[in-house]
Image (cartoon, rainbow, N blue to C red):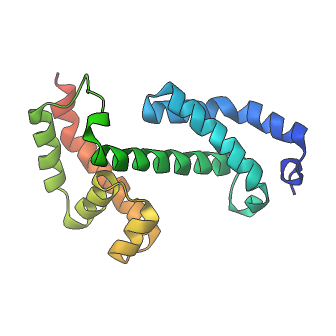
Amino acid sequence: MLAYQKGDAEAFNKLYNQLYKPLYSFLFRYTGEEQLSIDIVQDTFEQLQKKRQDFDVQKGTVKSYIFQIGYRLLINKLNRRKKWRSFFPFLVPMQVTSFSTEDKLAVQQAIAKLPEKQRGVILLAYYHDLQQDDIAKILAIPVGTVKSRLHQALKRLKEELKEDFHAE
C-alpha cells in the first residue's frame, strides 16, 4: 500500500507538489480558463484524499488515477454549465472568436463523409458530450471498440479538414 493511501501527510504533499503543475497544465489547455483549472485541481486533490483507499496499483499509476479524477470533475462541471446555460441563455458570455459558417459547414460535411459507425461515435462523443462507457452501452459495443472508432474517425477528420483549416 502506498504511503499516501495510509494517510501520510508528507507523502500526500509530495504527490501534490509533483502532480499539481502537470494536472493544472492539462486542465488549462483543455478549458483555457485559469480559475476553473485551479478549482478543479483543488477539487481533484480533495477527492483523492477521500478516495485514496480506492486506488489500485494493478490498474495504473497514481498520476493516471489523479488525471482521471480531474478529468471527470472537469467534464461534470462543464456539463452542469451547459445545463444552466440552456435554462438561462443570458448567462452565456459573448464569444469573441467563433467558427464561420463556412468552417462549420466544412466540419459537418467531413463528419457526413465518415463511415456510419464512426460517425455515430463522433456525434455521441462530441455533440452530445457522452462518455465512452455511455456510448458503448447505447451502441451495444465494447468500450475498446468505441475508442478504436473514435481514434479512426478523428484521424479521418484530421486528414479531411487539413486543407480547409491550414490553407488560411
* Quarter of the rendering containing residue 123: bottom left
Vertical arrangement, residue 165 with respect to residue 78, above or below: above
Q: Is residue 32 left or right of residue 152?
A: right
Quadrant of the drawing holding the C terminus: top left
The residue depicted at 26 percent of the width and 40 percent of the height is 89
Q: Is residue 136 left or right of residue 20?
A: left
Q: Residue furthest bottom?
A: 140
Residue 156: % across, % down: 25, 49
The residue depicted at 44 percent of the width and 34 percent of the height is 31
Vertical arrangement, residue 109 with respect to residue 148, above or below: above
The front one of 76 and 101 is 76
Residue 81: % across, % down: 40, 44
The front one of 127 and 108 is 127
* Quarter of the rendering containing residue 160: top left
Quadrant of the drawing holding the N terminus: bottom right
* Quarter of the rendering containing residue 166: top left
Vertical arrangement, residue 156 with respect to residue 140, above or below: above
Residue 97: % across, % down: 24, 24
Residue 42: % across, % down: 65, 37
Q: Is residue 147 left or right of residue 164?
A: right
The residue depicted at 40 percent of the width and 74 percent of the height is 137
The front one of 27 and 147 is 27
